Image (tube, helix red, strand yellow):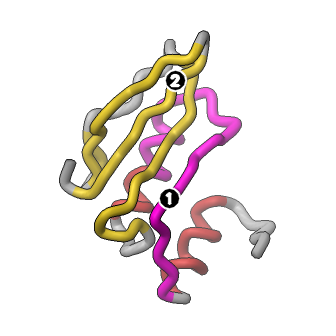
Amino acid sequence: TVLSLPVDRALEVLARAGDTFDLIFLDPPFADAAAYRRVLDAVAATALLAPDGVLVAQHDVRLPLPAAAGTLSRTRVQQIGDNALSFYRQGG
């Protein structure tokens, strides 16, 4: 399924449908931490991430992401060159 919608609208559609995911991967064209924070908060406010699921956010290493967002806690950061992957789980 491809949703050609802005991320906030797509999250609403998925949440309303009752969908849950074991893996959510964020690879946005965002250049600021506030945009990431809005998406992390939106995912945390829904039941989109399964209880044992993981959310992975790809970002520039110079753009630190929050240690927590709502019910999500960052459990690890993996640096790969100029990029990083931040892993989040429910409650840590």
Whether residue 42 is in magenta: the answer is no
The picture places residue 16, in percent across and down from the top left corner, at: 51, 86
Nearest the eye: 24 or 39: 24
Task: Tell me: 92 left or right of 81.
Answer: left
Q: Residue at x 38, y 61 (%)?
A: 53
Q: CA distance from mark 2 to mark 1?
A: 17 Å
Compared with 11, 54 (above or below) is: above
Q: Residue at x 37, y 70 (%)?
A: 50
The picture places residue 39, in percent across and down from the top left corner, at: 49, 52
Which contiguous range is marked in magenta? 18-39
Whether residue 24 is in magenta: the answer is yes
Going by the numbered disc 2, the residue's amino acid type is Ala
The kind of secondary structure element at disc 1 is strand
Task: Tell me: 42 left or right of 24.
Answer: left
Q: Residue at x 28, y 38 (%)?
A: 75
Which residue is identified by label 2? 84
